[in-house]
Image: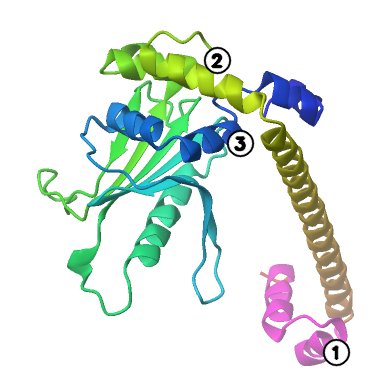
């Protein structure tokens, strides 16, 4: 999020929100199955006959202790599963997030006792406002291929696709170009984007959604503040440990210089390992 945006109140952020706002995007797509279907067809150049009602902010967590995930917009047709994520900033972790999201999709959909062949194709789609790979491509599509022979594909049905809105003007179709221009906050140019514009306006006049956004926005802020405080605490603890170790090493050097105690005795006094004491001794007398 840009620094200027962080100074806006939740109410101001709501008034200025576009389709690129995560909350707005999720609400619109989860309430409009037909719009979600059209968007997937535009993005993936496929035909979808029947789409399940999209779920927004779908949480998936395994039974064992692990990092759960929360998908922005999650839906499926008869043979495929789709996760659509809106990404307004480059957090440097998208490739790893895509990897983890795809694994959680598989865990969530392959039931106990089912054969692996029952797994559906899965698409993890990031709609990025920035070029996270810095190569100037409008779309980056990833499938597993053989390193020794690039013509051999693993064909495991796992697709990771990153769209770069900055290069929307050279995307393959006019519908894609128009959608990403609208996602950037520009005018609606097609019937589809005009429908989206109508839904954005309707969403921002929905008093219940506005209140939900205020709560959501505050929870995001609190999570960010908690994370920041934990990072500061961890950094302070690391610095304290480093300082304590440096002081212990100084003590070891002084005791070694006197030559009255063995490495084992010095290790016991300073709480360093015998190996560390011996290494410091070698450093003093190479």
Name the residue located 48 percent from the left edge and 16 percent from the top edge. Answer: 182
The residue that mark 3 highlights is 23
Image point (82%, 89%), residue name: 268
Q: Position of residue 50 (x, y in %)?
A: 26, 43
Q: How far apart are marks 3 and 2 (CA)?
A: 15 Å
What is the spatial separation of the Cα atoms under label 2 and label 1, in whole angstroms? 73 Å
Q: Tell me if 257 is positioned left or right of 264 in this view.
A: right
The answer to which quarter of the image holds residue 239 is bottom right
Residue under numbered circle 2: 185
Towards the viewer: 138 or 53: 53
The reply, left or right, for residue 206 in relation to residue 70 is: right
User: Which of marks 1 and 2 precedes in the sequence?
Assistant: 2
In front of the other: 217 or 131? 217
Residue in the image at 25% along x and 62% along y: 119
Residue depth check, mark 3 versus mark 2: number of the one nearer the observer: 3
Badge 1 density bin: few <14, some 14–19, many ≥20, Cα 10 Å = few
Magenta region, residue range: 259-284
Q: How crowded is mark 2: few (under 14 residues within 10 Å), some or many (20 or more)?
A: few
Which element is circle 3 on? helix
Q: Distance between the residues labelled 1 and 3?
A: 66 Å
Q: Which of marks 2 and 1 is in front?
A: 2
Label 2's element? loop
Which residue bears the numbered disc 1?
A: 261
* Disc number placed over residue 213 in the picture, else none: none
């Amino acid at each position: 999020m840009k620094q200027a945006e962080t100074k806006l109140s939740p109410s101001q952020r709501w008034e200025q929100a576009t389709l690129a706002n995560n909350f707005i995007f999720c609400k619109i797509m989860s309430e409009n199955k037909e719009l979600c279907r059209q968007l997937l067809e535009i993005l993936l150049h496929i035909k979808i006959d029947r789409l399940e009602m999209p779920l927004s902010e779908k949480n998936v967590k395994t039974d064992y202790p692990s990092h759960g995930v929360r998908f922005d917009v999650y839906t499926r047709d008869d043979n495929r599963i789709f996760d659509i994520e809106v990404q307004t900033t480059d957090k440097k972790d998208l490739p790893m997030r895509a990897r983890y999201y795809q694994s959680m999709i598989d865990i969530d959909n392959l039931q106990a006792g089912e054969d692996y062949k029952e797994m559906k194709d899965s698409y993890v789609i990031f709609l990025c406002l920035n070029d996270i790979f810095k190569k100037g491509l409008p779309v980056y599509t990833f499938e597993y291929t053989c390193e020794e022979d690039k013509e051999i594909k693993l064909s495991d049905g796992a697709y990771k696709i990153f769209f770069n809105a900055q290069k929307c003007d050279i995307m393959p179709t006019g519908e894609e170009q128009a959608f990403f221009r609208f996602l950037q906050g520009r005018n609606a140019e097609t019937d589809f984007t005009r429908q989206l514009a109508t839904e954005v306006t309707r969403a921002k006049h929905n008093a219940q959604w506005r209140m939900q956004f205020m709560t959501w926005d505050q929870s995001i802020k609190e999570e960010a503040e908690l994370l920041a405080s934990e990072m500061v605490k961890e950094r302070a603890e690391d610095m304290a440990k480093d300082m304590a170790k440096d002081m212990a090493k100084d003590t070891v050097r002084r005791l070694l210089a006197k030559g009255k105690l063995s490495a084992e005795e010095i290790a016991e006094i300073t709480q360093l390992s015998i190996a560390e004491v011996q290494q410091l001794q070698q450093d003093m007398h190479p």
